[in-house]
Image (tube, helix red, strand yellow):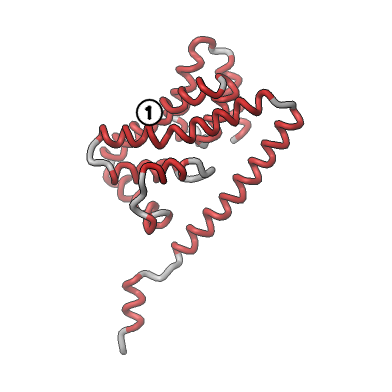
Amino acid sequence: MLEDTSVYIEVLKFTGIFAPLLFILLHAFRQFFFLPVGLICLAGGVLFGAVAGAFYSVIGITMSSVLFYWGIKSMPKLMRKIKKIQKKWIGKRMPFSVGQIAILKLIPFMHFHLLSLCLIEMSSNFREYTKASVISNIPIAIFYSSFGSIILSLSLLTSVILLTVLSVLFYLLRRKEWVIKWSEFFEDEPGKREKQRMPA
């Protein structure tokens, strides 16, 4: 995955004035390339700096959120499947506020579209959803873009150490996420518990 991202970065470097547009489109269609949002924001900080990288990332992530909105609305079967996954992962913690979703988006390997589904459910219309998406996309864009610009200004050794620490952090958070997922998945359903309590 990291090798694929480095290839995209090298391509963007040689696109000149079209680099921002291609970077935004990469964000918008990242799900087809299986790239994490944070990793692309990180690349934006390296390529364009913290401010411009964050700005382009907010536009790109919001475009991705809008595409998800219209896609999920036009495919009811896919909507039901994603809702089932949502119930297993974060259903018992609903409802969230926009601020809470913004924080959850900062967590590496958090399923981005599940959080977008949360925003859809708490929004009354497309305009409200788009506004909530923009607000919740700003923290992740600023955080990772700033980190990318910092890495660019450090020595090679320091950059490698920071990336190693970040990779370990990603792994630890991912393990914690799986623990939550499996514990909820194997938890007895209320209906089953009631049946067990009924006398024979």
Residue that appears at 48% across and 12% down: 18
Q: Secondary structure at mark 1?
A: helix
Which percent across, then down, holds residue 126?
25, 34
The single residue placed furthest to the bottom in the displayed view is 200
Give how far across and how far down residue 48 sits, in percent: 55, 19
Residue 5: x, y in percent? 58, 29
x and y percentages locating residue 33 in the rendered image: 50, 32
Q: Is residue 50 above or below residue 92?
A: above
Q: Is residue 151 above or below residue 199?
A: above
Which image quarter is the N terminus in?
Answer: top right
Task: Indicate the amino acid at tag 1.
Answer: Met
157 to the left or right of 94: right
Horizontal relation, residue 54 to residue 151: left or right: left
Q: Which image quadrant: the C terminus?
A: bottom left
Does 90 sit left or right of 175 as displayed? left
**Residue that label 1 marks:** 63
